[in-house]
Amino acid sequence: MYRTHTCGELRIENVGQSVTLAGWVQRVRKMGGMTFVDLRDRYGITQLVFNSETNQELNDRANKLGREFVIQIVGTVNERYSKNANMPTGDIEIIVEELNLLNASEVPPFTIEDQSDGGDDIRMKYRYLDLRRACVRKNLELRHKMCIEVRNYLSNLGFLEVETPMLIGSTPEGARDFVVPSRMNPGQFYALPQSPQTLKQLLMVAGFDRYFQIVKCFRDEDLRADRQPEFTQIDCEMSFVTQEDIIQTFEGMAKHLFKTLRGVELNEPFLRLPWAEAMRRFGSDKPDMRFGMEFVELMDTLKCGIFPVFDNATYIGGICAPGCAVYTRKQLDQLTDFVKRPQIGAKGLVYARVQEDGSVKSSVDKFYNPEQLEALKQKMEAKPGDLILILSGDDAMKTRKQLCELRLEMGERLGLRDKNKFALLWVTEFPMFEWSDEEQRLMAMHHPFTHPMDEDIALLDTDPAAVRADAYDMVCNGIEVGGGSIRIHDPKLQEKMFEILGFTPERAQEQFGFLMNAFKYGAPPHGGLAYGLDRWVSIFAGLDSIRDCIAFPKNNSGRDVMLDAPAAIDQKQLDELFLKVDVK
Ligand code: ASP
């Protein structure tokens, strides 16, 4: 038997027992004639004691143990003289009688401690060592618990977990496909699923009624901050439901997860915000509602033929940062630089301080008289001590998005984005389509299978850009944690949708014939949603990045630095696949 107990379970009640433990050497400390070894496994750390007076030979061997050696010991549980209240096993230690070296270790390239001395790259290269750190392992434990809770919750509601294939055809979710060449079908390729979207819809046609799957999805996108080329969804679909049914079911699941995994009770129904309102008030379809600082539109107040920048604008909006009137010139310059960063792209920032006496001092004082600045203060409902920050531009949507970045930055600076506070909402009534400059056509904002809102169907013929979708996103703390829609189940409407999206009937048939065909055989009304599992775990764990809750993540260039993938393949493999590589 390798062990009688784990390294995390012995307590004062076990004193006097003879035990066998196995694990990794975290640390060896020599103090006089005694040697202390911290023995670690997944469950915790237990202190081992060797005494040169009682057993010189054993003590000498203990002194030769290096970090991360794997050992087994037999010993007796002893009450510690100086207890460590910070450790669950801190009341006891093991007086070792027998020591077996199971495996030696090279000196690890970084310390296996919560506060490691290893940078990101080295820790990713040796991820199996990084995963030995309790702070990383905890995230994966949380992930496991979340999966169990999700499975139980959905199973209790009658959802069936069904696996769908990884080697399929294209599923448009707005990204590029990862493709896999087929040896048996020369010149042909599978695509890895961007999501199981069409397959779960087919399961509804098959009468499965309620489906879910915790499933890998693959999207070949430029890796913007915090994206992974492969990620995991909690993917769900239901038949004979309206948007309200889906929202109720999955809001219930969100509340259940918060309660069981974080001990947070969310009793109120989540706010629902139509997309247009979210954009108007927060400049974002995923507003961070942990704090206010809502946009105030200032066209009427500031566009009055005296300040050319504003006079040429089609949108002027401001936010009011409480207590920031004391910002120094330097801080204001920093904010200006912030909004001018290429990723944000504003041309400049106008600010106005509301002084203690209520008067307003602004960066545009030479254009506006005190009455006009007073009107600005009134409109902003600003109080003494507030700093008013204003952006303008000739594209309202773009300017709102810039102002959104500024709002988030101010929220961050003011400590209003507390990771232990959770603000959840549904964003609804998304536009059905968005114009793509790159493709010069309308694109589905969600995906091409989304049903338009019933009251907007007539607009499909006359004004498609105005059509709203029967779609919804769940947002938590400014992060989209899930989204879905009611689907089209009428083959005629689906055909029309493909047409609006610029598919010729032939291409639609070629790519999605299977779905439209299936719809001819009695497709039930259906809809669903997918939650991003990685994001949920990272929010619950208070992480900045989803990478930290993925066992073997990719880096920002989409590489697995541990496996050194992707990599070139042998000529023989290429030949078998009839592939020629032509990298310029
Ligand atoms: N397949 C969608 C996605 O991956 C979710 C859904 O509509 O259910 O975003």
Image: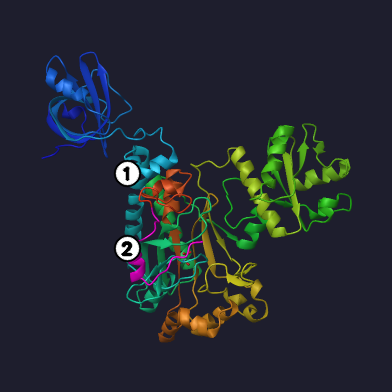
Which residue, given by chain and number where applicable, does mark 2 sit on?
Answer: 155
Where is residue 186 shown, x and y percent of the image?
A: 37, 76
Q: Is residue 170 left or right of residue 104?
A: right
Q: Secondary structure at mark 2?
A: helix
Quadrant hosting residue 411: top right
Where is residue 267 shown, x and y percent of the image?
A: 47, 51
- Relative to 447, does residue 365 appear above or below in the rendering? above
Residue 158 visible: no
Quadrant hosting residue 205: bottom left
Which residue, given by chain and number where applicable, does mark 1 sit on?
Answer: 128
Q: Residue at x 16, y 29 (%)?
A: 14
- Relative to 506, does residue 192 appear above or below in the rendering? above
Q: Is residue 400 left or right of residue 545?
A: right
Three-letter amino acid code at the position of disc 2: Ser
Sequence-wise first label, 2 or 1: 1
Residue 348 visible: yes
User: Does 580 appear in magenta?
Assistant: yes
Predominant secondary structure, magenta span? loop
Q: Which stretch is magenta?
A: 565-584
Where is residue 357 shown, x and y percent of the image?
A: 80, 32
Q: Is residue 54 left or right of residue 259?
A: left
Quadrant hosting residue 410: top right
Q: Nearer the viewer, residue 482 or 39?
A: 39
